[in-house]
């Protein structure tokens, strides 16, 4: 920590609720990354054993060696830190991208996500709009727009133009339907890691939003670079992901159930660490590396309210990509044991007197501004 740049050292004094509990193993989620400063043009190496815990305020984060990145400082880059995953070949990038694309382009998965996750993921949108200062007349790009929840909210806030970008036509059709009352909203089919020409030409934008989309990118750094390029000077980016377990109770329960009753090391395409942007050091360093200033990471309180634990299982098994792949790759008997463990624990811990489940599922929101000069 002492060797980190000043803007990263300062984060160790912030009261960031980023408690994280992880176990060794190359599963689909476990993450955390150690960042340190090295001279420009050199590459920092990582240790072969787990780092000791780093304290952020009153919480801790642990890192495991097989999930650590390398820190590469490219000569001439806008920032001294560029955080890159180790061992990510072009084949791995392609395989993970195909896993995500196959899931989200399926109409059944898009429908399950839209109906199952709407009441939870939309809870972060007011914070996104406030962080990016969307007001009447703003030009907004909503990356990985999905069903268009954030795009519509931006239009309702008075944005003069909202572009919803997504690679899934299954989602874009839902976005157009959801935003049909707003002529200011348009959609573009394209990749968040390589903005289409039509998106670039529509800019510059005052705000770029990405609500839970960064989790699904094989190369999330490219989203940051693209966002910086299309923002007007002084424009802002805000993106959300899930906060670190155990704060996100559903993922905490799922990970432990898979570890105890199944196989966390099943063969599925490996992507970037699922929770990497919930780590303040990683999120802020990557934003700085892309050229952003005034970078921050805050936790947004959210609660998943459902009638029963079976609904949560259906959300996970039918309305996700990476989680769905992890669960579908389990043996039949193990999958049933995992499901039972998840439903029992969620019911036991989070039932309310009204007969529902109230499950804490906060998001982590990373923000940054394109400098004025």
Image (cartoon, rainbow, N blue to C red):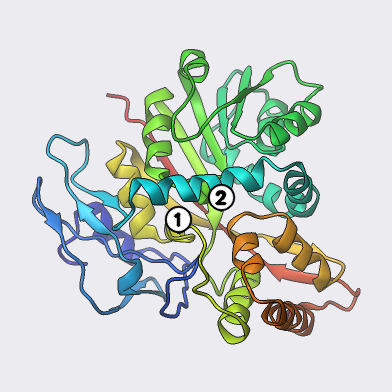
Q: Is residue 277 placed above or below 63 in the rendered structure?
A: above
User: Measuring 8% from the left and 51% from the top, which residue is drawn there?
Assistant: 39
Q: Is residue 313 left or right of residue 265?
A: right
For marks 2 and 1, give the one nearer the viewer: 2
Q: Is residue 267 placed above or below 99 in the rendered structure?
A: below
Q: Residue furthest top?
A: 201
10 Å crowding of disc 2: few (<14), some (14-19), many (20+): some
**Residue 101 at what x, y percent from top left?**
58, 43
Label 2 vs label 1: CA separation? 10 Å
User: Measuring 49% from the left and 60% from the top, which residue is drawn there?
Assistant: 274
According to the picture, the residue beneath numbered tag 2 turns out to be 99
What kind of element bears circle 1? Answer: loop
Q: Is residue 177 left or right of residue 300?
A: right
Q: Which one is nearer the viewer's eye here, 300 or 285? A: 285
What kind of element bears circle 2? Answer: helix
The answer to whether marks 2 and 1 mark residues whose Cβ atoms lie closer than 8 Å is yes
According to the picture, the residue beneath numbered tag 1 turns out to be 271
Q: Which of the two labelled residues, at mark 2 and mark 1, occupies the earlier sequence position? A: 2
């Amino acid at each position: 920590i002492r060797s980190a740049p000043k803007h990263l050292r300062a984060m160790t004094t912030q009261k960031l609720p980023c408690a994280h509990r992880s176990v060794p193993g190359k599963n689909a989620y476990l993450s955390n990354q150690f960042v340190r400063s090295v001279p420009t043009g050199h590459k920092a190496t990582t240790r072969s054993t787990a780092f000791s815990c780093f304290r952020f305020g009153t919480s801790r984060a642990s890192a495991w060696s097989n999930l650590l990145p390398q820190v590469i400082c490219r000569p001439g880059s806008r920032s001294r830190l560029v955080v890159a995953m180790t061992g990510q070949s072009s084949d791995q990038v392609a395989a993970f991208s195909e896993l995500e694309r196959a899931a989200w382009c399926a109409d059944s998965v898009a429908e399950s996500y839209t109906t199952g996750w709407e009441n939870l993921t939309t809870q972060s949108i007011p914070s996104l709009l406030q962080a990016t200062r969307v007001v009447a007349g703003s030009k907004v790009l909503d990356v990985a727009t999905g069903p268009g929840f954030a795009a519509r909210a931006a239009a309702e806030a008075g944005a003069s133009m909202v572009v919803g970008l997504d690679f899934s036509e299954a989602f874009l059709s839902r976005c157009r339907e959801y935003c049909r009352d707003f002529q200011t909203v348009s959609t573009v089919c394209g990749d968040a890691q390589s903005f289409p020409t039509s998106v670039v030409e529509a800019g510059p934008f005052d705000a770029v939003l990405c609500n839970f989309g960064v989790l699904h990118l094989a190369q999330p750094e490219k989203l940051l670079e693209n966002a910086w390029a299309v923002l007007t000077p002084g424009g802002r980016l805000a993106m959300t992901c899930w906060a670190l377990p155990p704060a996100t109770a559903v993922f905490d329960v799922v990970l432990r159930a898979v570890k105890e009753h199944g196989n966390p090391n099943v063969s599925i395409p490996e992507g970037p660490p699922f929770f990497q942007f919930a780590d303040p050091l990683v999120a802020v360093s990557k934003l700085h590396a892309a050229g952003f200033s005034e970078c921050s990471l805050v936790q947004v309180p959210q609660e998943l309210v459902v009638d029963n634990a079976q609904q949560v299982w259906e959300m996970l098994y039918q309305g996700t990509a990476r989680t769905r792949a992890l669960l579908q790759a389990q043996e039949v008997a193990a999958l049933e044991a995992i499901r039972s463990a998840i439903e029992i624990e969620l019911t036991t811990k989070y039932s309310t007197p009204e007969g529902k489940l109230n499950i804490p599922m906060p998001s982590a929101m990373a923000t940054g501004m394109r400098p004025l000069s």
